[in-house]
Image: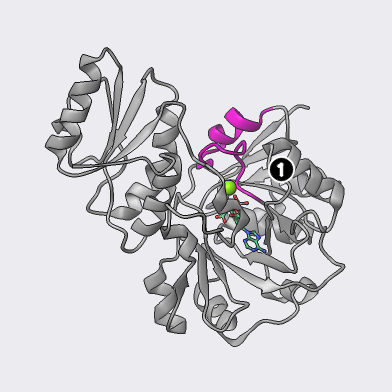
């Protein structure tokens, strides 16, 4: 299959009449799949009401069938079609954060969406992304769009159209290229089917921001309990994810300690990579040192994280050591993704 790359300027006023968006919407209505930009990462979209389209999404990514997709909408009124009820707290979260990087789990109305999209669950994850190109596309095709991140399963999520092409070229009808995404980590997934909302995946909207709107919010215990066999409630969180090719270790301790680990491995003849931030990158002596944003502004670390992990695959290293980050604000999502990328390998001083 020929994969079209459609360049779209997201700052143009009349996106609705953009011929590339009209083309992409046409493919979606024909039950083909196309990649699209959101404010978090690029998604791989398909008609959420059609089994054939959803099957193509799973096939292109190589995604396990038990991992449900997020349904994307352009307008709150679309919720009514496939959601049973919108609880009071969910209403408040919608008013505060949509469009934006927040996915909400609802009880599902049966018989509307493809069963494959929700992996046969009685619940459904929904979000309205804050990206003019995504919203124009959804409005143009008039369908609820199932869209996981547009990477091959297991790889870091794509934050540029180039990342999408690297993973999915020849497997999808096209990608709308609107430049790098802003947030860089995926949406926060919050379960609103229970009285107290539960974060199933930390992301672009922080726990602190959610609590300011609805009071107490819990975090799925399986996310912090990395030793036991607690089963995460978001099926996708149980898979190893985001991993670069070389083994990645998170280092808890001083920068001198991290440098000693680097020196030991180099003495053994290994090529060593370091994942750090702009503030400290000049302090390390290693074969490859990559700065991932600025530690003083964790949003910049989130924005650069997946591109940095992907860059380690383009250089020749045998092992990677990474600094750790505070878990406040978007740091919770950054550390969650780094821990998954490292397969929970942490070396403490
Ligand atoms: O920012 C994002 O959310 C991006 C962009 C493209 O919108 N999408 C994304 O989708 O990250 P995906 O498929 O890569 O991750 C969806 C996560 C998975 O961990 C999945 O298991 C979980 O949401 N999920 C989906 N439906 C669920 C449900 N009904 N109950 C619990 N978890 C669910
Ligand atoms: Mg994903």
Q: Is residue 225 left or right of residue 256?
A: right
Across and down, in percent, residue 174 comes to: 70, 37
Q: Quadrant of residue 141?
A: bottom right
Q: Residue at x 49, y 66 (%)?
A: 220
Number of numbered discs on residues: 1
Q: Is the CB–ligand 1 distance for label 1 below 8 Å?
A: no
Residue at the disc numbered 1: 34
Across and down, in percent, residue 17 comes to: 71, 53
- Asked if residue 249 is among those painted magenta in the image, a careful observer would answer no
Q: Is residue 318 left or right of residue 97?
A: left
Q: Quadrant of residue 34?
A: top right
User: Can you name the residue that lies furthest to the front here?
Assistant: 228
Q: Which residues are magenta?
A: 148-169
Q: Is residue 13 left or right of residue 203?
A: right
Protein image colouring: one colour
Toward the viewer: 110 or 39?
110
Q: Residue at x 53, y 48 (%)?
A: 41
Q: Quadrant of the C terminus?
A: top left
Report crowding for label 1: few under 14, some 14 to 19, many 20 or more residues within 10 A (C-alpha).
many
Toward the viewer: 250 or 78?
250
- Asked if residue 151 is among those painted magenta in the image, a careful observer would answer yes
SS for callout 1? strand
> Would residue 250 be seen by someone viewing this image from the given angle?
yes
> Would residue 14 be seen by someone viewing this image from the given angle?
no
Q: Residue at x 51, y 62 (%)?
A: 101
Q: Is residue 73 above or below residue 77?
A: above
Q: Is residue 245 above or below residue 132?
A: above
Toward the viewer: 243 or 283?
243
Q: Residue at x 72, y 73 (%)?
A: 79
Q: Is residue 92 left or right of residue 141?
A: left
């Amino acid at each position: 299959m020929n994969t079209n790359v459609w360049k779209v300027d997201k700052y143009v006023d009349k996106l609705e009449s953009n011929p590339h968006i009209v083309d992409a919407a046409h493919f979606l209505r024909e039950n083909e799949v196309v990649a699209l930009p959101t404010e978090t990462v690029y998604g791989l979209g398909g008609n959420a009401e059609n089994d054939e389209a959803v099957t193509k999404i799973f096939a292109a990514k190589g995604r396990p069938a038990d991992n449900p997709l997020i349904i994307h909408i352009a307008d709150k009124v679309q919720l009514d079609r496939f959601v049973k009820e919108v609880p009071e707290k969910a209403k408040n979260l919608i008013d505060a954060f949509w469009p934006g990087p927040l996915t909400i789990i609802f009880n599902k109305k049966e018989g509307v969406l493809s069963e494959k999209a929700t992996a046969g669950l009685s619940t459904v994850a929904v979000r309205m992304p804050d990206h003019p190109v995504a919203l124009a596309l959804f409005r143009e095709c008039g369908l609820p769009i199932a869209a996981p991140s547009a990477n091959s399963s297991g790889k870091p999520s794509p934050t540029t159209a180039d990342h999408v092409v690297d993973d999915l070229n020849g497997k999808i009808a096209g990608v709308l290229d609107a430049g790098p995404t802003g947030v860089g980590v995926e949406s926060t997934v919050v379960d609103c089917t229970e009285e107290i909302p539960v974060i199933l995946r930390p992301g672009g909207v922080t726990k602190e921001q959610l609590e300011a709107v609805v009071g107490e919010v819990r975090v799925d215990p399986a996310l912090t309990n990395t030793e036991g066999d607690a089963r995460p409630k978001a099926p996708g969180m149980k898979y190893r994810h985001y991993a670069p090719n070389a083994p990645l270790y998170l280092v808890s301790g001083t920068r001198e300690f991290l440098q000693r680990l680097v020196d030991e491995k180099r003495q053994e003849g290994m090529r060593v990579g370091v994942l750090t931030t702009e503030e400290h990158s000049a302090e390390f002596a290693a074969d490859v040192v990559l700065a991932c944003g600025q530690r003083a502004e964790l949003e910049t670390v989130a924005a650069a994280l997946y591109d940095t992990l992907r860059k380690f695959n383009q250089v020749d290293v045998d092992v990677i050591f990474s600094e750790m980050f505070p878990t406040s604000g978007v740091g919770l999502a950054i550390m969650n993704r780094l821990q998954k990328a490292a397969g929970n390998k942490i070396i403490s001083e």
